[in-house]
């Protein structure tokens, strides 16, 4: 059964386009019914990021959940990993994060977490999808059994304490000047305060959300502003989160970007030395650079690859017994601490290594030389451009030209109408030519 609403990271689309109040209300009802198990009072935690449409979706979902008899706990703007943590901590039956992650304000989305703080399985999402297409009028709660809703105070402090406890008690960030870019998103309050409490000299940017500026020329998808600020302030490190703070990109003292693959390398080597890896390896996606795989192999560690999407990384981590995994984009999952990607906690692990080694970030965070990797996006208006005969021929020819000395990965995005074309190999000029040829064919098919 193909999925109609859910993509690789919940339900996502244009606010008041795909993501309407009607849909949000129906998702609340369907998810609420799917997670009513037992006779206890059921409760759901709802968090959001800072985009304008969050108000509309939040209240529509409150109506949906309360109409099927679930109590609602509203926590306001909070990082996605904080909502996952609070869902489990507050003994809720379900958690909701209203966010489109790294997308601009026009989009929004609905991410759902089960009672243990994990994203839902495909089977549960299919169950909710089936309910979304049914009439639920006869399954609504009786008048006396409707749910209640209230706002919860103090959740910022709970997340700050949780994040700080992922570090040794005696570790301080004293002496480190840290520029942190919160993308005008969900972490704009908690992360600068947490860094200050840990002793860092904090320079916050991207902390003035207005409903429209989330991820706009800031955050992990646009780290240029952070690079500039790090150089201007002569900071030791820059931390760039995305709109819901489940991913992170770092910037070294020279203003150079450090991606998720390098972060995985740093944490993996550190945890191996400290005997903290549960298995001799980590989990990453097909997008991770071959240079990372070669580095890990040199450390006696394996790299297990999954399809793109942090949910698939986590599934492999749980089934294989791994406690470290992530994506090149900066989704880093540390399952000893969190049930989903946590950009801030991942950054703290790297800061701990920086403090331990007392070396510049440019040295600490350069563990391998990545192979040339070219990634280009082709936007389309629907249909199936990948099924075009000329596109198939371009891909086949490209694979022959790389001849085993590189790899191609062409896939449709699970969150937007985009086809991503990635080529990797030792010969950059060859890789660029192969990718460009495929992109041209896709562009013509999409047109």
Image (spheres, rainbow, N blue to C red):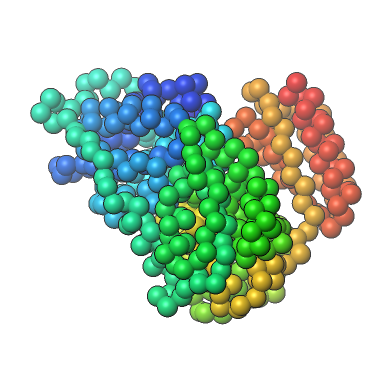
User: Residue 60 placed where, x, y %?
Assistant: 33, 26
**Corner quadrant of residue 438:** top right
x 85%, y 36%: residue: 437
Whether residue 98 is visible here, answered yes or no, is: yes
Image position, residue 249 (x, y; %): 61, 54
Please say if 372 is above or below 360.
above
Q: Quadrant of residue 39?
A: top left
Could you tell me if residue 309 is visible in this image?
no
Which residue shows up at 17% across the image and 30% down it? 146
Quadrant position of residue 371: bottom right
Q: Position of residue 141 (x, y in %)?
A: 18, 27
Extreme left residue here? 144
Q: How many numbered callouts?
A: 0
| Left or right, residue 439 beside residue 355 | right
Q: Residue at x 47, y 56 (%)?
A: 192
Q: Is residue 217 left or right of residue 404?
A: left
Lateral position of residue 331 relative to residue 64, left or right:
right
Q: Nearer the viewer, residue 285 or 167?
A: 167
Q: 431 or 158: which is nearer to us? A: 158
Q: What residue is shown at x 77% (from left), y 47% (from top)?
A: 374
Can you name the residue that lies furthest to the front here?
A: 233
Q: Position of residue 109 (x, y in %)?
A: 46, 34
Q: Quadrant of the C terminus?
A: top right
Instruction: Tell which of 147 and 142 is nearer to you.
Output: 147
> With respect to residue 198, does 73 lie above or below?
above
């Amino acid at each position: 059964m193909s999925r109609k609403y859910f993509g690789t990271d919940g339900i996502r689309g244009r606010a008041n386009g795909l993501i309407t109040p009607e849909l949000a209300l129906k998702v609340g009802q369907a998810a609420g019914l799917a997670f009513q198990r037992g006779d206890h009072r059921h409760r759901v935690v709802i968090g959001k990021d800072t985009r304008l449409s969050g108000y509309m979706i939040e209240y529509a979902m409150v109506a949906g959940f309360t109409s099927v008899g679930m109590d609602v706990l509203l926590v306001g703007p909070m990082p996605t990993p904080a909502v996952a943590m609070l869902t489990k901590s507050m003994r809720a039956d379900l958690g909701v994060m209203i966010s489109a992650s790294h997308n601009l304000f026009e989009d929004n989305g609905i991410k759902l977490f089960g009672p243990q703080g994990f994203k839902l399985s495909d089977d549960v999402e299919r169950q909710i999808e089936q309910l979304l297409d049914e009439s639920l009028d006869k399954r609504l709660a009786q008048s006396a059994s409707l749910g209640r809703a209230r706002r919860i105070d103090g959740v910022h402090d709970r997340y700050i304490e949780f994040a700080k406890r992922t570090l040794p008690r005696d570790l301080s960030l004293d002496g480190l000047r840290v520029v942190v870019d919160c993308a005008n998103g969900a972490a704009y309050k908690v992360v600068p305060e947490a860094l200050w409490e840990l002793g860092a000299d904090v320079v916050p940017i991207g902390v003035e959300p207005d409903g429209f500026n989330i991820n706009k020329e800031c955050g992990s998808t646009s780290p240029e502003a952070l690079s500039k600020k790090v150089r201007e302030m002569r900071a030791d490190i820059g931390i760039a989160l995305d709109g819901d703070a489940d991913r992170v990109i770092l910037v070294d003292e020279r203003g150079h970007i450090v991606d998720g693959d390098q972060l995985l390398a740093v944490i993996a080597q550190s945890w191996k030395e400290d005997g903290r890896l549960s298995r001799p390896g980590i989990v990453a996606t097909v997008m991770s650079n071959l240079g990372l795989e070669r580095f890990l192999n040199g450390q006696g560690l394996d790299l297990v690859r999954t399809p793109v999407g942090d949910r698939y990384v986590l599934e492999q981590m749980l089934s294989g017994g791994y406690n470290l995994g992530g994506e090149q984009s900066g989704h880093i999952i540390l399952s000893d601490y969190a049930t989903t990607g946590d950009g801030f906690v991942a950054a703290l692990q790297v800061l701990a290594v920086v403090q331990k080694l007392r070396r510049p970030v440019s040295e600490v965070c350069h563990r391998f030389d990545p192979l040339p990797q070219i990634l280009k996006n082709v936007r389309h208006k629907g249909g199936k451009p990948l099924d075009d005969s000329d596109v198939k021929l371009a891909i086949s020819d490209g694979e022959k030209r790389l001849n085993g000395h590189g790899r191609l990965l062409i896939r449709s995005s699970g969150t937007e109408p985009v086809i991503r074309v990635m080529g990797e190999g030792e010969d950059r000029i060859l890789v660029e030519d192969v990718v460009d040829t495929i992109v041209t064919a896709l562009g013509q098919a999409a047109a």
